[in-house]
Amino acid sequence: MPKPRTKKDVLVVETCLLAGKIMIENGSEMSRVTDTIYRIAENAQAYQARAYVTLTGIMMSPSSKIGAQIAVIEKRTFNLEKVSLVNDYSRQFAEHKITLQEFHSRLALIEKNVKDFPFWLQTLSAAIISGTLEVVFRNNLPDLWAACVVGMLGWIAYYMISKYIAVQFISEFLAAFVVAVASVIAIKLHLANSTDDLIIGGIMPLVPGVPITNAVRDALSGNLVSGPARGLEAFMIACALGFGVALALTIFK
Amino acid sequence: MFILNIFFVYIATVCFGILVNVPHRALNLDGIVGVLGWLVYYLYVNHFGGYIGGNFFGTFTIGIAGVLASRYKKLPVIIFNIPGLVPLVPGGQAYQVMRDMALNEYGLAKYNLLQVAFIAGSISAGFLVAEVVNQLLFKARHYRSPRHYHRDKLEKIEKKRHR
């Protein structure tokens, strides 16, 4: 019994794809995305919906008679607030507090309305992370301030480079280079005691925490496509950081 | 020094939360989860010794506390897991590997690389066991596989049709 392609089916697919796209782009794990998509479909009475979710794209068909639609995911950043917002909307939709149409229009507004924390606050936090973790890891209290400054410089370099250059991993590489060079200079000027401690502290804001955690969670949920892909991303970032530091040390030692 | 370290871990975790843009209302609990994980790690390493066990139990604590926090705040679990993990990341050893390689000291590099590998392994093992405990004890919602989703509803629809 072939069903005609209805407006509602189209809207269901559009909403599911948009929700999944926002979640993956902002650093959610795959099982959560799959779960959210199926829940939205279930609550919209599209019981025959099927979806295939990977790190770089989503395919979804609302029923067996209608062709699948695709969403391509090209950029990946970290904004966990957007992930939790999509979650909230999905929950509201399940409780019939918002309609499907409202759900879709709210999702479309997320990209525009939800902002990252401001740049100065992020820079300040990067500085604080560097200083505090340097003390926690190495028990080197006198170098706290130098580590703060070094970490701040590294984060500014990372932010600016990833904003203006669209090459993956170059921002981590150059930021690590900046951190190492700044540390060596600080030692040469007798502002601090230990290069190692400064570099370890300065690199901590750049650590790929989101890809590491998601790689583990994806692999554990049995997603053998996206888990290793995330793991590779984390490994590449770690390598870029390491090569940046190693390059600076070989040049300036 | 110990109290200062706890305070610093709290601040660092909250600040990492700011870097990955977690929702405002989760920031405080992020810090508490991070401190709990680090405390377990620290006490284990100082009383029993061994980074592997310390990281395992630290991550395990983060996994359990993360699920409890996420239920309390009704937010995704990763919001609490990701910043909480930061004080346990083997950044120091990973850096030493690269430094030793850059300075042509491959013996030391190999030693540190093995340490990093084992710490990473124990972190994932900690998450794995925490996941198992969450499902068994707290009946945490584990994600269903797609083919279980609409089966009962489809059956109902079929029955209606036959009537």
Image (cartoon, rainbow, N blue to C red):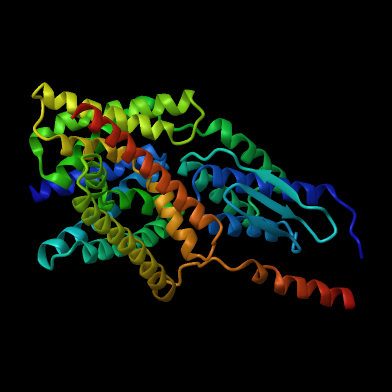
Would you say A146 lies left or right of B131 here?
left
| Quadrant in the picture for residue A112 | top right
Measured from the top left, where is residue A205 in percent x and y? 31, 38
Residue at 77%, 75% (x, y): give it.
B155
Instruction: Return the x and y of residue B120 as percentages of the image width and height.
Output: 32, 58
Q: Residue furthest right?
A: A1
Quarter holding the C terminus of chain B is: bottom right
Label total for image:
0
Q: Is residue A121 visible?
A: no
Looking at this view, is B115 or A40 the one in front? B115
- In the picture provided, is A169 more to the left or to the right than A111? left
Instruction: Provide residue A132's location: percent of width, then percent of height.
Output: 19, 40
Q: Which x, y percent locates residue A1?
A: 92, 65
Please tell me which residue lies in front, A16 or B87: B87
Relative to the observer, which residue lies in front, A66 or A115? A66
Q: Report which quarter residue A204 is drawn in.
A: top left
Left or right of A22 in this view: B24? left
Q: At 60% across and 47% down in the image, what residue appears? A: A56
Q: Horizontal placement of B29 versus A25: left or right?
A: left
